[in-house]
Image: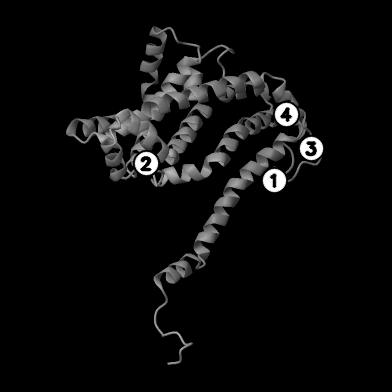
Amino acid sequence: MKSGDRPAGPPPAGRRRRHWTRRANPVAGLGSILWLVVVIIPIYAMLSASLTSQDKALTGNPLSPPTDPTLDNYNTVLNSGFGHLLANTVIVAVAVVGIVLALCVPLAYVAVRTRNRWSGLAFRLFLLGVAIPAQAVVVPLYLLIAKLDLYDSLLAVILPTAAFAMPVSVLVLVGTLRDVSEELYEAMALDGASPQRMLFQLAVPMAKGGISTVVIYSALQAWNGFLFPLIFTQSDGPRVLTLGLFNYVSQFGVNIPALLASVVLSGIPIFAVYLVARRALVGGLMGVGGK
């Protein structure tokens, strides 16, 4: 064998892994394209219809671009109290996120760090909330909110929305905090750190992925919520964006272009939040937020 020749044999393991990950997968590619088409076509039809005048909304091909695009529908939405609806929705979303984080982060920390039968039982009982649909308890909730004199207020929307977002949030945070190395906790304990200090200086920074997931999940629950605002509010004061869509529905018809324009404007803020935190969201859902 010459000095410049390399011995024959299998390639290194790292090179084999790189070759495997770069191998084409036409089935997955085709599935991704089909899913992209399924998602994009409704969005395109919605944007196209929102730029069409009301008299042309129900005529022609819905997938064809508008022949005479107009922004009158967006002006109609912006001049119909959209700012008030948006402000109420932002207040609800921020309050729900704050309540969920303030309660779920310590709960998940206790569930991970306290290793006894009672903490495990409490954690399992808490997760039963995932199996309870909101429709099943809306009547007791209505009576409770009426007794507390919270009906027709933003608190009547915030509190139940936060309560139903907590079980999934705790489940995500527990999976994230379990990825934190036990040696790090032991090192801080040897330095005399209290449990509160380990929570805020170790667990919370290491669980940014899971926390980002919880923030987006709970914000989506508040932003897209319809049942609780519909049942627990009545006047225009605490009305949110999902109920504001009824402004374009009357007994004589529906202003479809204005309705779709309102949907487009309503989705822009939460879509922007998703774009900022999408990597942390995916990492938290995969259970690797603590790595």
The residue that disc 3 covers is 69
Mark-to-mark CA distance, 3 and 4: 12 Å
- Mark 4 and mark 1 in contact (Cβ < 8 Å)? no
Nearer to me, 33 or 136: 33
Which three-letter amino acid code belongs to the residue tagged 4?
Tyr
Residue 251: x %, y % from top left: 64, 19
Nearer to me, 245 or 168: 168
Above or below residue 176? Residue 54 is above
- Mark 1 and mark 2 in contact (Cβ < 8 Å)? no
The image's mark for residue 63 is 1
Residue 242: x %, y % from top left: 56, 25
Q: Residue furthest bottom?
A: 1
Q: Residue at x 56, y 11 (%)?
A: 235
Q: Earlier in the sequence, mark 3 or mark 2?
A: 3
Above or below residue 27? Residue 273 is above
Q: Earlier in the sequence, mark 3 or mark 4?
A: 3
Which three-letter amino acid code belongs to the residue tagged 3?
Pro
Residue 142 placement, left or right of 33: left
As helix, strand or loop, the secondary structure at mark 3 comes to loop
Which label sits in the foreground, 3 or 4?
4
Quarter of the image holding residue 130? top left
Q: Residue furthest left?
A: 117
Q: Residue furthest right?
A: 68
Q: Earlier in the sequence, mark 2 or mark 4?
A: 4
Q: Earlier in the sequence, mark 2 or mark 1?
A: 1
Q: Earlier in the sequence, mark 3 or mark 1?
A: 1
Mark-to-mark CA distance, 2 and 1: 43 Å
Mark-to-mark CA distance, 1 and 4: 20 Å
Q: Residue at x 43, y 43 (%)?
A: 284
The residue that disc 2 covers is 176
